């Protein structure tokens, strides 16, 4: 166990240097040595001794609201943080040319991963990707962008076109898709996408906290108005394979039914059973092995760790950055 997801109302307290999770129905003990993060998906009361124990064992706490959106993080002090890396990240962020160059790598990588998803889903559905050529054309706009702000506009246009094609991909699925809606999600596909993105953001942030990188300093997303932003940059590269393709397989594998969602005229979210079903498959995915050119087959979580190591070398000018490519050949 690395991530602990608490989905029922209850209390998290300490019992003999072990975390005790108590609900009306049951109580469970969790040894702290096997936990890296705790995700509070319900109204869980966390006692101060429990927070202290988490701090002592470098356990992250993530809080979510009733709509499954992240609302806060408890992060213990991190002795692994490197002043050298912090200064290198800050230097890149404050240098417009270096920041723009690295940000373009993220957008190029993200766009290429979106194209991969469309290609694979189109083959699966026996469809022809009519928007791929138009998406490819955006690569020229990425190269010609002169500021990070203009680059973000290009990235937003790419995603808009990307999501338009989902209407064709999911046209014959159990849950049709019309358009991307986030706050709140309006249908089942949007609910799955928002939930998967949230889990990916938190997993990426968790791995950044374990590294020597500083999560507060990014290159594509602004570092001025958020506590953390680097995980948003990195997650853009992993979304198409770990969330979009993952959700595609779940939907067409008939893993979910309408009973796994709570829906009305204004919003749609995963029910308790839907969250449990999703988290079970999600954890299996990240523990599964996938091919990696440089090291053979490694678990998906290792892909993320290696990407952060590459990024650190790029910040410290030890190596040019080549963005992540998902194992689409499997």
Image: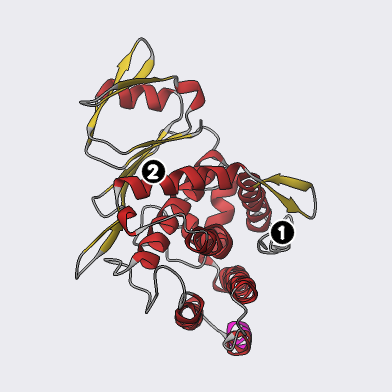
The residue at which mark 1 appears reads as 330
By secondary structure, the bulk of the magenta-drawn segment is best described as helix
Q: Does residue 223 appear anywhere in the picture?
A: no
Determine the secondary structure under disc 1.
loop
Residue with the most extreme top position = 16
Q: Who is closer to the viewer here, 315 or 158?
A: 158
**Image height of 54 relative to 244, above or below:** above
Q: Residue 207: percent from the left, percent from the top?
A: 54, 44
Q: Nearer the viewer, residue 127 or 235?
A: 127
Q: Quadrant of the C terminus?
A: bottom right
Magenta segment, which residues?
139-144
At a point 56% along the width and 84% down the height, the residue shown is: 145
Question: Is 319 on the left or on the right of 259, as rendered?
Answer: right
Asked whether the beta carbons under mark 1 and mark 2 sit within 8 Å of each other, the answer is no
Identify residue for label 2.
276
Q: Nearer the viewer, residue 131 or 228?
A: 131
Is 108 magenta? The answer is no
- From the top left corner, tell me how far across and down residue 45 is, in percent: 22, 31
Residue placed at 23% from the left, 50% from the top? 66
Cα gap from disc 1 to disc 2, whole angstroms: 26 Å
- Residue 93 appears left or right of 71: right
Determine which quarter of the picture holds residue 15. Answer: top left
Res 318 quadrant in image: bottom right
Q: Name the mark on residue 234.
A: none
How many callouts does the rendering have? 2
């Amino acid at each position: 166990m690395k991530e602990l997801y608490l989905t029922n109302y209850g209390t998290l307290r300490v019992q003999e240097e072990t975390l005790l999770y108590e609900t009306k129905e049951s109580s469970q003990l969790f040894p702290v040595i096997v936990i890296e993060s705790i995700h509070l998906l319900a109204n869980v009361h966390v006692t101060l001794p429990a927070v202290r124990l988490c701090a002592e064992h470098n356990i992250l706490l993530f809080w979510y609201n009733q709509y499954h959106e992240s609302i806060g993080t408890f992060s213990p002090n991190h002795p692994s943080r490197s002043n050298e890396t912090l200064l290198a990240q800050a230097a890149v962020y404050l240098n417009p040319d270096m920041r723009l160059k690295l940000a373009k790598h993220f957008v190029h990588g993200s766009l290429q991963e979106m194209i991969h998803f469309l290609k694979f889903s189109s083959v699966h559905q026996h469809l022809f990707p009519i928007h791929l050529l138009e998406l490819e054309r955006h690569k020229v706009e990425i190269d010609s962008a002169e500021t990070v702000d203009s680059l973000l506009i290009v990235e937003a246009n790419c995603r808009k076109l990307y999501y338009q094609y989902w209407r064709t991909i999911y046209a014959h699925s159990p849950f049709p898709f019309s358009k991307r809606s986030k706050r709140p999600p309006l249908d089942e596909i949007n609910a799955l996408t928002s939930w998967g993105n949230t889990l990916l953001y938190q997993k990426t942030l968790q791995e950044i906290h374990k590294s020597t990188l500083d999560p507060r300093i990014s290159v594509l997303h602004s570092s001025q108005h958020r506590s953390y932003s680097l995980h948003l940059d990195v997650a853009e590269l992993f979304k198409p394979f770990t969330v979009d393709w993952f959700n595609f397989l779940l939907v067409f594998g008939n893993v979910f039914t309408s009973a796994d969602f709570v829906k009305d005229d204004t919003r749609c979210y995963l029910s308790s059973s839907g969250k449990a079903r999703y988290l079970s498959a999600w954890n299996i995915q990240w523990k599964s092995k996938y091919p990696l050119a440089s090291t053979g087959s490694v678990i998906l979580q290792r892909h993320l760790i290696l990407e952060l190591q590459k990024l650190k070398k790029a910040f410290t000018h030890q190596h040019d950055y080549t963005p992540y490519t998902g194992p689409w050949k499997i």
